Amino acid sequence: MKAMILAAGRGERLKPLTVITPKPLLIVGNTTLLGHTLHQLHDAGIKDVVINVHHLKDQIIDYCGNGSHFNLNIQYSIEDELLETGGGLFQALPLLGNKPFLLISGDIWTDYPLTNLIIKPVRAAHLVFVNNPDFHLAGDYSLDKNNIVRADHSEKFTYANIGIIHPDLFYAEKPGAFRLTKVLQPAINQGLVTGEHYSGVWHNVGTTKALHELREHLR
């Protein structure tokens, strides 16, 4: 299975840090956000990784290279303009192939065992959810008793930006910027998306406060 890391964003809420450093290369503990994720992917048995890049892309490409020093094979999907999550994945499909791939955001830190995902059967997608953080108390979706993702149940969890995506989700799409929810929502409505709730460590490093909290956690 291949993996896709989302690393193209500008990190607006982390300015001024992200004016000179792309968010995935911010230092946390003894590595970077991206370095931690790459090591996790390797430990899970992933060999082939695609990273989409835009903001300060040369820094990310210089840091990762061809992936050999992470014992990975890394390719890049370069976005001349930001394509959002869905558009970024669509552009990267020629590199990802026609089989389900692992998707993870380059601005999170978690101890979620990625090996769990590799063995999951997938129809359209399988998503990991976490308890709702302070910045997103309303949550995103619910899980029914069969672990089918629902939009209409009362108890909702937050999408952790980790999952398995089937490329067939994008069969009707065209190049351009669009959100992942554009293709996910119809599949959710049809009951084709499964999910799981994870209660372990998960940090979304979207603000300076969140970055500080993660660094404190890793001390």
Image (cartoon, rainbow, N blue to C red):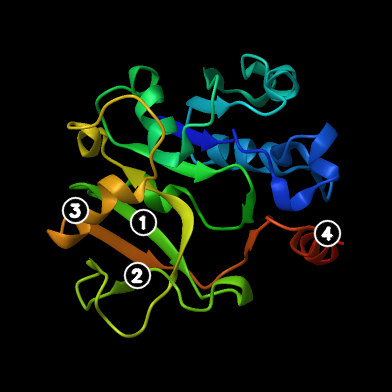
Q: Which of marks 1 and 3 is in front?
A: 3
- Gap between marks 2 and 1, in whole Å? 10 Å
Label 4 residue SS: helix
Which residue shows up at 19% across the image and 53% down it? 186
Quadrant of the image containing the N terminus: top left
Label 2 residue SS: loop
Assess disc 1: are there few (<14), some (14-19) or many (≥20) residues with their C-alpha within 10 Å of its C-alpha: many
Say whether disc 3 or disc 2 marks the residue closer to the N-terminus: 2
- Gap between marks 3 and 4, in whole Å? 38 Å
Which residue shows up at 74% across the image and 35% down it? 22
Q: Which of marks 2 and 1 is in front?
A: 2
Kindly check if marks 3 and 4 are in contact, taking CB atoms under 8 A apart as contact: no
Kindly check if marks 2 and 1 are in contact, taking CB atoms under 8 A apart as contact: yes
Which residue shows up at 34% across the image and 17% down it? 94
Say whether disc 2 or disc 1 marks the residue closer to the N-terminus: 1
Say whether disc 4 or disc 2 marks the residue closer to the N-terminus: 2
Quadrant of the image containing the C terminus: bottom right
- Gap between marks 1 and 4, in whole Å? 26 Å
Left-right relation of 8 to 138: right
Residue on which the image places disc 2: 141
**Res 215 label:** 4
**Res 144 label:** none
Q: What type is the residue that disc 2 sits on?
A: Tyr
Residue on which the image places disc 1: 127
